[in-house]
């Protein structure tokens, strides 16, 4: 949290700022694609306590003034952002290629992967789908 305070992502009293690119994965579905068939992106995700998937773009790591970091807690925001799972989702050709448990803030263990397996089940899968990768 000290780094988050230093980088201006967490403020005492108000908590984590909200990543401006945050959106529910459900809202990105366009037919049989996430966004469209040309969409390729790796981005952080969280699975909320009500089992919805939230995604958002990374804005930076805080090494320059114009690159405020956007860690996983900023996908939810607030003083105590609780989630069931967090990691990185890899979308290729508008379909889920893989997802993992890579989150330095939440540090989900391998048992938490069940939440991601269940949550991503309903989304379009890439033909070379790798599934959940435990890191």
Image: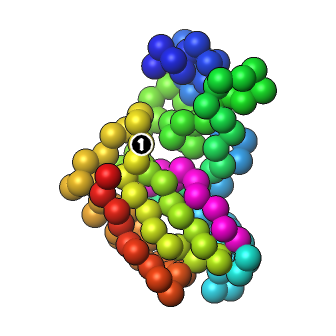
Residue range (magenta): 39-49
Q: Which residue is drawn at 40% across and 58% down?
A: 100
Q: How crowded is mark 1: few (under 14 residues within 10 Å), some or many (20 or more)?
A: many
Q: Is residue 135 visible?
A: yes
Q: Residue at x 72, y 23 (%)?
A: 64
Magenta region includes residue 110: no
Magenta region includes residue 41: yes
Q: Can residue 14 be seen in this view?
A: no
Residue 130 on image: x %, y %: 40, 74
Please state which of residues 13 and 74 is positioned toward the viewer in this rendering: 74
**Main SS, magenta residues:** strand
Please state which of residues 88 and 82 is positioned toward the viewer in this rendering: 88
Q: How many labels does the image show?
A: 1
**Residue 39 lies in quadrant:** bottom right
Q: Residue at x 45, y 79 (%)?
A: 129
Residue 41 on image: x %, y %: 64, 62
- The correct choice, above or below, for 60 with respect to 13 in the image is below
- The correct choice, above or below, for 41 with respect to 9 in the image is below
| Residue hosting label 1 | 103
Label 1 residue SS: loop
Residue 107 on image: x %, y %: 33, 40
- The correct choice, above or below, for 130 with respect to 84 in the image is below
Image side of residue 16 versus residue 47, left or right = right
């Amino acid at each position: 949290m000290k780094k988050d305070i230093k980088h201006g992502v967490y403020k005492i009293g108000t908590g984590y700022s909200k990543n401006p690119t945050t959106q529910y994965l459900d809202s990105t579905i366009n037919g049989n694609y996430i966004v469209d068939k040309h969409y390729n992106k790796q981005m952080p995700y969280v699975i909320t306590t009500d089992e919805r998937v939230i995604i958002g773009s990374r804005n930076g790591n805080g090494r320059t003034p114009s690159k405020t970091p956007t860690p996983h807690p900023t996908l939810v925001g607030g003083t105590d952002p609780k989630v069931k799972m967090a990691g990185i989702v890899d979308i290729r050709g508008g379909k889920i290629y893989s997802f993992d448990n890579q989150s330095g803030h939440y540090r989900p263990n391998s048992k938490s992967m069940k939440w991601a397996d269940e949550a991503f089940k309903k989304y379009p899968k890439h033909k070379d789908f790798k599934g959940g990768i435990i890191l």
